[in-house]
Image (cartoon, rainbow, N blue to C red):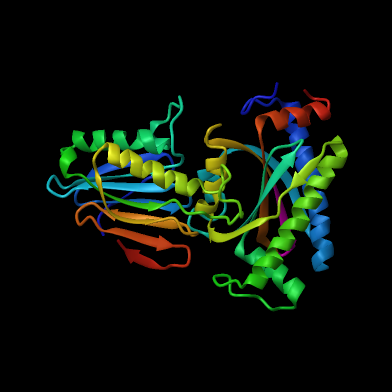
Amino acid sequence: MEKSIIVGISDMAVARTPAVVATYALGSCVGICLFDQVAHVGGLSHILLPKRNNNDNYMKFADSAIPLLVQKLEQIGAHRLRLRAKIAGGAQMFNVGRSDSALGNIGQRNIESVKGALQTEKIRIYAEDTGKDFGRSIFFDVNTGVLKIKTAFNKTYDI
Amino acid sequence: MVEYGKFNDIQLDVLKEIGNIGSGNAASSLAQMIGKTIDMVVPQVNMMRYSDLAEALGGPENLIVGIMIDVTDDLQGTMMFLLQREFTHEVFNALMGGNTPDFSALSELDLSLIQEIGNILSASYLNAIASLTDLRINISVPAICVDMVGAILSVPAIKYGEVGDEVLLIEGAFIGREDKADITTKLILILEESSLALLMGRLGVA
Protein backbone atom coordinates (compact mmCIF):
# COMPACT_ATOMS: atom_id res chain seq x y z
CA MET A 1 0.00 0.00 0.00
CA GLU A 2 1.22 3.48 -0.86
CA LYS A 3 1.46 6.16 1.75
CA SER A 4 -1.96 7.29 2.96
CA ILE A 5 -2.59 10.94 3.65
CA ILE A 6 -5.42 11.41 6.13
CA VAL A 7 -7.61 14.44 5.64
CA GLY A 8 -9.58 15.74 8.65
CA ILE A 9 -12.90 17.58 8.78
CA SER A 10 -12.78 20.98 7.03
CA ASP A 11 -9.40 20.06 5.64
CA MET A 12 -7.85 19.10 2.31
CA ALA A 13 -4.70 17.56 0.87
CA VAL A 14 -3.11 17.21 -2.55
CA ALA A 15 -0.49 14.68 -3.62
CA ARG A 16 1.52 13.30 -6.51
CA THR A 17 1.31 9.61 -7.36
CA PRO A 18 1.84 7.18 -5.87
CA ALA A 19 -0.40 8.21 -2.99
CA VAL A 20 -3.70 7.50 -1.34
CA VAL A 21 -5.64 10.36 0.21
CA ALA A 22 -8.29 9.31 2.68
CA THR A 23 -10.85 10.67 5.09
CA TYR A 24 -12.75 8.81 7.81
CA ALA A 25 -16.41 8.64 8.63
CA LEU A 26 -18.11 11.08 6.30
CA GLY A 27 -21.65 11.55 7.52
CA SER A 28 -23.56 14.45 6.07
CA CYS A 29 -20.22 15.96 5.06
CA VAL A 30 -19.02 15.45 1.48
CA GLY A 31 -15.63 14.25 0.29
CA ILE A 32 -14.54 15.69 -3.07
CA CYS A 33 -11.73 13.92 -4.97
CA LEU A 34 -10.13 15.65 -7.93
CA PHE A 35 -7.46 14.12 -10.14
CA ASP A 36 -5.44 14.73 -13.27
CA GLN A 37 -4.20 11.44 -14.72
CA VAL A 38 -1.79 13.07 -17.11
CA ALA A 39 0.00 15.12 -14.48
CA HIS A 40 -0.37 12.24 -11.97
CA VAL A 41 -1.73 14.42 -9.20
CA GLY A 42 -4.89 14.37 -7.12
CA GLY A 43 -6.45 15.72 -4.00
CA LEU A 44 -9.25 15.35 -1.49
CA SER A 45 -11.36 17.92 0.31
CA HIS A 46 -13.69 17.15 3.25
CA ILE A 47 -16.34 19.85 3.51
CA LEU A 48 -18.81 20.42 6.34
CA LEU A 49 -21.25 23.03 5.04
CA PRO A 50 -22.55 24.26 1.68
CA LYS A 51 -21.88 28.01 1.64
CA ARG A 52 -19.23 30.26 3.13
CA ASN A 53 -20.50 33.47 4.69
CA ASN A 54 -17.63 35.65 5.90
CA ASN A 55 -16.00 32.68 7.58
CA ASP A 56 -12.21 32.51 7.60
CA ASN A 57 -11.99 28.80 7.02
CA TYR A 58 -12.20 28.31 3.25
CA MET A 59 -11.75 24.55 3.56
CA LYS A 60 -14.95 24.14 5.57
CA PHE A 61 -17.43 25.11 2.87
CA ALA A 62 -18.17 23.52 -0.51
CA ASP A 63 -18.29 26.77 -2.48
CA SER A 64 -14.91 28.00 -1.22
CA ALA A 65 -13.09 24.67 -0.74
CA ILE A 66 -13.44 23.46 -4.33
CA PRO A 67 -11.80 26.49 -6.01
CA LEU A 68 -9.04 26.27 -3.39
CA LEU A 69 -8.48 22.56 -4.09
CA VAL A 70 -8.27 23.29 -7.82
CA GLN A 71 -5.73 26.04 -7.14
CA LYS A 72 -3.60 23.73 -4.97
CA LEU A 73 -3.67 21.03 -7.65
CA GLU A 74 -2.62 23.54 -10.30
CA GLN A 75 0.31 24.50 -8.10
CA ILE A 76 1.63 20.94 -8.28
CA GLY A 77 1.13 20.58 -12.00
CA ALA A 78 -2.51 19.78 -12.68
CA HIS A 79 -4.29 21.32 -15.60
CA ARG A 80 -7.78 22.58 -14.85
CA LEU A 81 -9.19 21.17 -18.11
CA ARG A 82 -8.01 17.66 -17.27
CA LEU A 83 -9.45 17.56 -13.77
CA ARG A 84 -12.06 14.91 -13.05
CA ALA A 85 -14.15 14.56 -9.88
CA LYS A 86 -15.47 11.75 -7.75
CA ILE A 87 -17.63 12.61 -4.78
CA ALA A 88 -19.01 10.70 -1.80
CA GLY A 89 -20.97 11.43 1.38
CA GLY A 90 -23.87 13.77 2.07
CA ALA A 91 -25.86 11.13 3.90
CA GLN A 92 -28.89 11.79 6.03
CA MET A 93 -27.74 10.10 9.22
CA PHE A 94 -30.83 10.62 11.32
CA ASN A 95 -34.28 10.10 9.94
CA VAL A 96 -35.91 13.05 11.64
CA GLY A 97 -39.03 12.86 9.52
CA ARG A 98 -38.97 16.46 8.36
CA SER A 99 -36.62 16.65 5.44
CA ASP A 100 -37.81 20.17 4.59
CA SER A 101 -36.34 21.69 7.76
CA ALA A 102 -33.03 23.52 7.76
CA LEU A 103 -31.14 20.65 9.30
CA GLY A 104 -33.44 17.95 7.95
CA ASN A 105 -31.39 17.25 4.92
CA ILE A 106 -28.18 19.17 5.14
CA GLY A 107 -26.46 16.27 3.38
CA GLN A 108 -28.52 16.93 0.27
CA ARG A 109 -27.75 20.65 0.42
CA ASN A 110 -24.06 19.84 0.70
CA ILE A 111 -24.23 17.58 -2.36
CA GLU A 112 -26.05 20.26 -4.36
CA SER A 113 -23.54 22.92 -3.39
CA VAL A 114 -20.62 20.63 -4.29
CA LYS A 115 -22.14 19.93 -7.70
CA GLY A 116 -22.77 23.63 -8.27
CA ALA A 117 -19.20 24.53 -7.36
CA LEU A 118 -17.81 21.80 -9.65
CA GLN A 119 -19.96 23.06 -12.47
CA THR A 120 -18.66 26.59 -11.91
CA GLU A 121 -15.13 25.19 -12.23
CA LYS A 122 -16.26 23.18 -15.28
CA ILE A 123 -15.16 19.91 -13.73
CA ARG A 124 -17.06 16.78 -14.69
CA ILE A 125 -18.18 14.29 -12.05
CA TYR A 126 -17.00 10.82 -13.08
CA ALA A 127 -18.56 8.89 -10.24
CA GLU A 128 -20.49 9.54 -7.08
CA ASP A 129 -21.79 7.68 -4.07
CA THR A 130 -23.91 10.22 -2.26
CA GLY A 131 -26.99 10.56 -0.09
CA LYS A 132 -28.66 7.55 1.54
CA ASP A 133 -28.42 7.02 5.28
CA PHE A 134 -25.00 5.65 6.17
CA GLY A 135 -21.53 6.92 6.94
CA ARG A 136 -18.57 6.35 4.63
CA SER A 137 -14.80 6.27 4.96
CA ILE A 138 -13.17 6.96 1.62
CA PHE A 139 -9.73 6.12 0.21
CA PHE A 140 -8.75 7.76 -3.04
CA ASP A 141 -5.94 6.27 -5.09
CA VAL A 142 -4.42 9.23 -6.92
CA ASN A 143 -2.65 6.94 -9.39
CA THR A 144 -5.63 4.91 -10.63
CA GLY A 145 -8.40 7.35 -9.79
CA VAL A 146 -10.22 4.56 -7.95
CA LEU A 147 -12.24 5.68 -4.95
CA LYS A 148 -12.64 2.95 -2.35
CA ILE A 149 -15.62 3.34 -0.02
CA LYS A 150 -15.99 1.59 3.31
CA THR A 151 -19.20 1.67 5.34
CA ALA A 152 -19.79 1.14 9.07
CA PHE A 153 -20.60 -2.53 8.63
CA ASN A 154 -17.39 -3.22 6.73
CA LYS A 155 -18.89 -3.26 3.30
CA THR A 156 -16.36 -1.98 0.79
CA TYR A 157 -16.72 -1.12 -2.85
CA ASP A 158 -14.98 0.94 -5.51
CA ILE A 159 -16.41 3.68 -7.63
CA MET B 1 -23.33 38.04 28.24
CA VAL B 2 -22.07 34.53 28.00
CA GLU B 3 -19.55 34.05 25.25
CA TYR B 4 -18.67 30.73 23.76
CA GLY B 5 -15.24 29.65 24.86
CA LYS B 6 -14.92 32.30 27.52
CA PHE B 7 -16.41 30.89 30.65
CA ASN B 8 -15.19 31.83 34.07
CA ASP B 9 -14.81 29.35 36.90
CA ILE B 10 -18.19 30.11 38.43
CA GLN B 11 -19.96 29.64 35.09
CA LEU B 12 -18.13 26.37 34.52
CA ASP B 13 -19.16 25.15 37.96
CA VAL B 14 -22.76 25.99 37.20
CA LEU B 15 -22.61 24.08 33.92
CA LYS B 16 -21.07 21.11 35.68
CA GLU B 17 -23.81 21.20 38.26
CA ILE B 18 -26.44 21.29 35.52
CA GLY B 19 -24.79 18.24 33.98
CA ASN B 20 -24.68 16.59 37.37
CA ILE B 21 -28.34 17.13 38.18
CA GLY B 22 -29.49 16.18 34.69
CA SER B 23 -27.48 13.03 34.37
CA GLY B 24 -28.19 12.07 37.98
CA ASN B 25 -31.88 12.13 37.24
CA ALA B 26 -31.39 10.28 33.96
CA ALA B 27 -29.24 7.63 35.66
CA SER B 28 -31.90 6.88 38.25
CA SER B 29 -34.52 6.55 35.50
CA LEU B 30 -32.27 4.13 33.67
CA ALA B 31 -31.53 2.17 36.85
CA GLN B 32 -35.24 1.91 37.52
CA MET B 33 -35.89 0.73 33.99
CA ILE B 34 -33.28 -2.03 33.96
CA GLY B 35 -33.41 -2.87 37.67
CA LYS B 36 -29.68 -2.46 38.15
CA THR B 37 -27.37 -0.04 39.87
CA ILE B 38 -26.07 2.64 37.58
CA ASP B 39 -22.99 4.54 38.56
CA MET B 40 -22.30 7.96 37.29
CA VAL B 41 -19.08 9.81 36.86
CA VAL B 42 -18.92 13.52 37.63
CA PRO B 43 -19.81 15.34 34.41
CA GLN B 44 -17.13 17.09 32.45
CA VAL B 45 -17.69 20.47 30.91
CA ASN B 46 -15.43 20.95 27.94
CA MET B 47 -14.88 22.99 24.88
CA MET B 48 -14.04 20.16 22.56
CA ARG B 49 -13.46 19.59 18.89
CA TYR B 50 -15.74 17.00 17.31
CA SER B 51 -12.73 15.12 16.03
CA ASP B 52 -11.36 14.82 19.60
CA LEU B 53 -14.73 13.61 20.82
CA ALA B 54 -14.73 10.96 18.09
CA GLU B 55 -11.27 9.86 19.27
CA ALA B 56 -12.55 9.61 22.85
CA LEU B 57 -15.29 7.29 21.61
CA GLY B 58 -12.96 4.78 20.01
CA GLY B 59 -11.97 6.61 16.83
CA PRO B 60 -14.07 8.01 13.98
CA GLU B 61 -14.88 4.61 12.47
CA ASN B 62 -16.04 2.98 15.69
CA LEU B 63 -19.59 1.68 15.48
CA ILE B 64 -21.95 3.23 18.03
CA VAL B 65 -25.60 4.01 18.61
CA GLY B 66 -26.45 7.71 18.43
CA ILE B 67 -29.67 9.12 19.80
CA MET B 68 -30.43 12.72 18.91
CA ILE B 69 -33.08 14.90 20.50
CA ASP B 70 -33.95 18.49 19.58
CA VAL B 71 -34.36 20.77 22.56
CA THR B 72 -36.83 23.60 21.98
CA ASP B 73 -38.92 26.23 23.77
CA ASP B 74 -37.07 28.41 26.32
CA LEU B 75 -33.82 26.54 25.67
CA GLN B 76 -32.63 25.78 22.14
CA GLY B 77 -30.13 23.09 21.47
CA THR B 78 -29.44 19.45 20.85
CA MET B 79 -29.02 16.55 23.16
CA MET B 80 -27.18 13.43 22.09
CA PHE B 81 -26.63 10.07 23.71
CA LEU B 82 -23.74 8.11 22.32
CA LEU B 83 -24.04 4.52 23.40
CA GLN B 84 -21.08 2.24 23.00
CA ARG B 85 -21.72 -1.28 21.89
CA GLU B 86 -21.11 -2.86 25.29
CA PHE B 87 -23.48 -0.48 27.00
CA THR B 88 -26.24 -1.22 24.53
CA HIS B 89 -25.73 -4.95 25.07
CA GLU B 90 -25.85 -4.47 28.81
CA VAL B 91 -29.13 -2.59 28.66
CA PHE B 92 -30.64 -5.12 26.27
CA ASN B 93 -29.56 -7.97 28.49
CA ALA B 94 -31.08 -6.35 31.54
CA LEU B 95 -34.34 -5.49 29.80
CA MET B 96 -34.87 -8.47 27.56
CA GLY B 97 -33.24 -11.18 29.64
CA GLY B 98 -30.05 -12.01 27.80
CA ASN B 99 -31.51 -11.55 24.39
CA THR B 100 -28.73 -9.45 22.92
CA PRO B 101 -29.31 -8.48 19.31
CA ASP B 102 -26.60 -8.46 16.71
CA PHE B 103 -25.33 -4.92 16.88
CA SER B 104 -24.85 -4.68 13.13
CA ALA B 105 -28.38 -5.79 12.36
CA LEU B 106 -30.75 -4.25 14.86
CA SER B 107 -34.42 -4.85 14.09
CA GLU B 108 -37.16 -2.23 14.08
CA LEU B 109 -38.19 -3.48 17.50
CA ASP B 110 -34.64 -3.18 18.86
CA LEU B 111 -34.40 0.35 17.51
CA SER B 112 -37.69 1.40 19.01
CA LEU B 113 -36.52 0.05 22.36
CA ILE B 114 -33.35 2.16 22.07
CA GLN B 115 -35.50 5.11 21.08
CA GLU B 116 -37.61 4.65 24.18
CA ILE B 117 -34.47 4.53 26.32
CA GLY B 118 -33.37 7.80 24.70
CA ASN B 119 -36.75 9.29 25.38
CA ILE B 120 -36.71 8.39 29.05
CA LEU B 121 -33.11 9.51 29.56
CA SER B 122 -33.51 12.86 27.83
CA ALA B 123 -36.85 13.62 29.45
CA SER B 124 -35.53 12.95 32.94
CA TYR B 125 -32.32 14.87 32.25
CA LEU B 126 -34.11 17.97 31.01
CA ASN B 127 -36.96 17.74 33.53
CA ALA B 128 -34.40 18.15 36.26
CA ILE B 129 -33.02 21.27 34.61
CA ALA B 130 -36.50 22.64 33.87
CA SER B 131 -37.68 22.34 37.44
CA LEU B 132 -34.45 23.80 38.80
CA THR B 133 -34.59 26.85 36.54
CA ASP B 134 -38.32 27.21 36.03
CA LEU B 135 -37.80 27.17 32.25
CA ARG B 136 -40.06 25.50 29.72
CA ILE B 137 -38.13 22.83 27.86
CA ASN B 138 -39.60 20.76 25.09
CA ILE B 139 -38.01 17.72 23.49
CA SER B 140 -38.54 16.08 20.13
CA VAL B 141 -39.04 12.39 19.49
CA PRO B 142 -35.55 10.86 19.57
CA ALA B 143 -33.94 10.03 16.24
CA ILE B 144 -31.69 6.95 16.13
CA CYS B 145 -28.66 6.12 14.06
CA VAL B 146 -26.30 3.16 14.27
CA ASP B 147 -23.14 4.02 12.40
CA MET B 148 -19.56 5.28 12.65
CA VAL B 149 -19.14 7.77 15.48
CA GLY B 150 -17.51 10.33 13.18
CA ALA B 151 -20.43 10.19 10.76
CA ILE B 152 -22.92 10.56 13.60
CA LEU B 153 -21.05 13.54 15.03
CA SER B 154 -21.08 15.24 11.63
CA VAL B 155 -24.72 16.05 12.33
CA PRO B 156 -24.20 18.37 15.35
CA ALA B 157 -20.90 19.52 13.81
CA ILE B 158 -22.86 20.78 10.82
CA LYS B 159 -25.77 22.13 12.85
CA TYR B 160 -23.44 24.27 14.96
CA GLY B 161 -20.80 24.62 12.27
CA GLU B 162 -21.46 28.31 11.71
CA VAL B 163 -20.67 29.02 15.37
CA GLY B 164 -17.34 27.21 15.42
CA ASP B 165 -15.49 23.95 15.19
CA GLU B 166 -15.50 23.59 18.91
CA VAL B 167 -18.57 23.18 20.98
CA LEU B 168 -19.39 23.37 24.63
CA LEU B 169 -20.18 19.89 25.76
CA ILE B 170 -21.84 19.16 29.02
CA GLU B 171 -20.80 15.60 29.07
CA GLY B 172 -21.92 12.94 31.47
CA ALA B 173 -21.18 9.26 31.59
CA PHE B 174 -22.97 6.31 33.09
CA ILE B 175 -21.22 3.18 34.11
CA GLY B 176 -23.39 0.13 33.82
CA ARG B 177 -21.37 -2.35 35.85
CA GLU B 178 -18.77 -1.64 38.48
CA ASP B 179 -16.25 -4.22 37.31
CA LYS B 180 -16.32 -3.00 33.74
CA ALA B 181 -15.30 0.58 33.38
CA ASP B 182 -15.67 0.51 29.63
CA ILE B 183 -19.41 0.04 29.70
CA THR B 184 -20.21 3.69 29.46
CA THR B 185 -22.38 5.99 27.51
CA LYS B 186 -21.77 9.63 26.87
CA LEU B 187 -24.48 12.18 26.86
CA ILE B 188 -23.98 15.55 25.43
CA LEU B 189 -25.97 18.73 25.69
CA ILE B 190 -25.19 21.40 23.14
CA LEU B 191 -26.96 24.70 23.76
CA GLU B 192 -27.24 27.79 21.59
CA GLU B 193 -25.36 30.81 22.90
CA SER B 194 -28.54 32.72 23.83
CA SER B 195 -29.90 29.70 25.69
CA LEU B 196 -26.70 29.40 27.69
CA ALA B 197 -27.03 33.03 28.69
CA LEU B 198 -30.63 32.49 29.73
CA LEU B 199 -29.71 29.42 31.74
CA MET B 200 -26.91 31.27 33.49
CA GLY B 201 -29.24 34.18 34.24
CA ARG B 202 -31.81 31.90 35.83
CA LEU B 203 -29.15 30.43 38.04
CA GLY B 204 -27.91 33.86 39.07
CA VAL B 205 -24.57 33.88 37.25
CA ALA B 206 -25.22 36.21 34.36
Asked if the stretch drawn in magenta spans residue A113, the answer is: no
Name the residue: 71% across, 43% down. Answer: B71
Asked if the stretch drawn in magenta spans residue B176, the answer is: yes
Spot occupied by residue B141 in the image (x, y as percentages of width and height): 70, 54
The image quadrant that residue A127 belongs to is: bottom left
**Relative to the observer, which residue lies in front, A126 or A145?**
A126
Q: Is residue A90 left or right of residue B6?
A: left
Spot occupied by residue A39 in the image (x, y as percentages of width and height): 13, 44
Spot occupied by residue B24 in the image (x, y as percentages of width and height): 81, 50
**Up-down: is B87 above or below A41?**
below
**Relative to the observer, which residue lies in front, A8 or A131?**
A131
Q: Is residue B83 left or right of residue B162?
A: right
The image quadrant that residue A83 belongs to is: top left
Spot occupied by residue A96 in the image (x, y as percentages of width and height): 61, 54
Q: Is residue B148 left or right of residue B167?
A: left
**Relative to the observer, which residue lies in front, B181 or A150?**
A150
Name the residue: 40% across, 62% down. Answer: A150
Give the magenta-colored segment's residue range.
Answer: B172-179
**Is the magenta region chiefly helix, strand or loop?**
strand
Name the residue: 52% across, 42% down. Answer: B158
Q: Quarter holding the C terminus of chain A? A: bottom left
Can residue B64 be seen? no
Q: Quarter holding the N terminus of chain A? A: bottom left
